[in-house]
Amino acid sequence: MLTSMLKLNPQTRALWLSGLAAAYRTAAACAIVAVATLFGPAALRIQVAFPAFSYVTVILVITGASLGDTFRGCWDAFCATVLTVIPAILGLWAIGPAELTTALTAVVVGMAAFVVMLPDHKTHLVSKRIALGQIVIIYVVAYDKGGETDPVMHPVHVAASTAVGVVACVIALLLPYPGLATCQVKKKCKLYADNASEMVKLCVKAFCANDDTSAQAFVSQAKSLSIKGSKLLNAIKSKKESMKWETIPINFLKPYCMKTAEKLQDTEMPIQGMLIALQNIHPFPPQILDQDLKDHLDNLEENISQTFDQLKSCMPFDLATFPESNHENLMLSPHTFPQSHKDLPSFFFLFCSNLLQRKMNNNSLKNPPSPADQRSKKSQKEGLFEWISAFVMHRRFTLALKCSLSVGFAVLFGLIYSKQNGIWSGLPVAISFAASREAVFRVSNLKAQGTVLGTVYGVLGCFVLEKYVKVRFLILLPWFIFCSLLRRSRMYGPAGGVSAVIGAVLILGREHFGSPTEFAIIRIVEAFIGLSCSIVVELMFRPTRASTLAKIQLSKSLQVLNECICTVSHGGQKECLGGDLKKLKANVNELRKFIEEAEMEPNFWFLPFNGGCYNKLLKTLSNMVSLLVFLNHANASLQEENLSLDKVEGEVELFKEMIQPSLKCFESIVLVKSLNKLEKELQRNNACDTSSDLELGKLPIPQNKLHRHGPNGEDEIDNIIDSYLKTSYELVFGEVCGEVKGHEVVLSSSAFAFCMRGLVTEAREIEKGLMELLQWENPSSHVNLYEISSKIDALYNI
């Protein structure tokens, strides 16, 4: 049955095999811990006094299911033990376990957690989680046992329990064969190479299709492969850190995998550009397509397939290039040039295909920084050093304080509820604390559900194997497989999956904790106490809702986008956008995180978050980022030819004048919470009727140049682009010498024009999205973005 299921779908089969591999490694490590703590020598069992924490260590360390992750986890566990055990021995010796009280224990745990979380980001999060877990066990158990606790041997027993879990992880990742991240990356690279090669074939087929129906079918196939390719690239990126920990004897594989992965990532952007071009071509086939161009595209497809095949093999990286005999440039017919804006998508497709060819044939993965960039970075580093240091210290201090209060309060209220079981309120908070921002309500809900699921499964397992206590850990094997799939699901995710594993392990792997049913109830109650404390502390430090932050971040993204548009020019530096484009990418990524969090947070008494509208705006901004990247590439290519580009600078300035006022207007409009409140506040400040002032022209309304039309009703941006193309034609065929260079300039000029037109189109989509958003937030008001902008300006200028 399993074989027939695995044959249904290759993606399903890969998912199952990946889940089974992770489940096997986890189950093997837990089995090793069980054998060592249940059947091992008496001397070992005496030292490993907390087998439950050995299981927890396994779950924390082996999550990545690769040898590199496990080696890093070993180092993390060692660092955690150094951070925790030595200070704990001194602390218990100085205070005395018999002198501990509920309040004092919570204070000591909170202070120790603060010290652990304060070091910089170089200390890995897994190390800090293990250290926090050790702190909770050391001090809470010492308080529970009182004077019976040995100040030296008690922390040593905790360290020994951690070590058993770490050693079990290493053995599980080595048997029956090493689970190498390098091999996983190599496999993913081969899959991505096949995927990218197929995408290029589909794009070429779509471009050469004889009708729209066939072309759209090929584009649809390419889009689905694009989603798959993005997932593969993310999987490759996630293993880069792990590969650094895998040294001899596999060091000879690392350069191949790391360099090949970087080269494959470089191919994603041109292929995405080819898809963008195909979505704008209408009708098919494009007018530029002739037999010579079709033959060239066929050769390009064949060459790229050969190169991807070389990258899939184990040949040295430097040999994975285009075959020398096929290094031919795109040759267009003489004086071929886009006649109007309607021809631009076809030329943009050819520009992206040439860009892909150069990326595939370029052995230098990263362009060296220019002297201007180096000088800029040096001055920025000197100017921002003190500010960055202060910011980082403030962030680390805040994070450490938040962790300290969360764990401290969890231990305090857990001990108040039950002195003997107070550990189970602080431990879940300690081992799952996140350094980055997360959707606290959703994550806490998933942790609670996972804890209940795992605990109930553990109780049922104890009931089934009630008479076979020594072997009941075997019932965990199917649970590991289920939870490995649960971790990959959207319903539970990593937080719910890990909590479910730990919940079952702590029930089935425990000894001397009384009845399983009673212990399960206590575990659930204590976990609820701990999660409630973490939620309250999180809200204390983060009172602003994610929906509000998404609105603010959208305004910031529009502001940075406007700055990028300001820097668009044919003059000046080779890459006109420079650091502004990186800043825009970072802001858009931050906006994506806030939107994802806002969609998962509860509404309570607030207005529901309009995730659909925000996602439309996010998609539009992402499209504009892509267009700016291609525009930057096209401008760099033009700058290399030393042309008199100032002749077309006038059209570029007209493009900027068309789009910038609207973006400036959108920045402030996004932050408006209520149009009625805006109207009332304006009337209260200037004691006038804003509606009458608008009609009389006392409040100037910004010009909407985004939708400006020419004298014959044509779109103004089309007139600008056509004028740009006309001037570029005269420039190209008047100054450029050499047929090959002329073709490259034609494609670069066409790509630049295509991106300018696309940016205006996307800006109009932003306008539509903002109108939809404001109308949804103010259903009883008439929404005119430019009138609202004039009111905002009037209010702040009073």
Image (cartoon, rainbow, N blue to C red):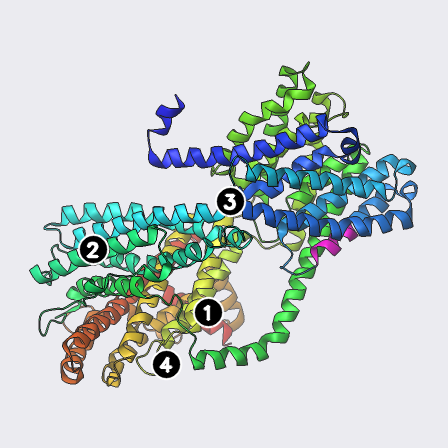
Kindly identify which residue carries mark 3. Answer: 600
Q: Position of residue 700 (x, y in %)?
A: 38, 75
Residue at horizontal 73 percent and vertical 23 percent from the top = 518
Front residue of 398/145: it is 145
Amino acid identity at mark 2: Glu
Answer whether labels 4 and 3 touch (C-beta < 8 Å): no
Q: Position of residue 139 (x, y in %)?
A: 81, 43
Residue at horizontal 38 percent and vertical 34 percent from the top = 12
Q: Where is residue 220 in the image (x, y as percent from the top left)?
A: 24, 46
Front residue of 47/12: it is 47
Q: Give the range drawn in magenta.
A: 110-118
Q: How crowded is mark 1: few (under 14 residues within 10 Å), some or many (20 or more)?
A: some
Q: Is mark 1 on a helix, strand or loop?
A: helix
Q: Residues within 10 Å of mark 3 (few under 14, many from 20)?
A: some
Kindly identify which residue carries mark 1. Answer: 792
Q: Where is residue 297 in the image (x, y as percent from the top left)?
A: 16, 58
Q: Distance between the residues labelled 3 and 2?
A: 43 Å
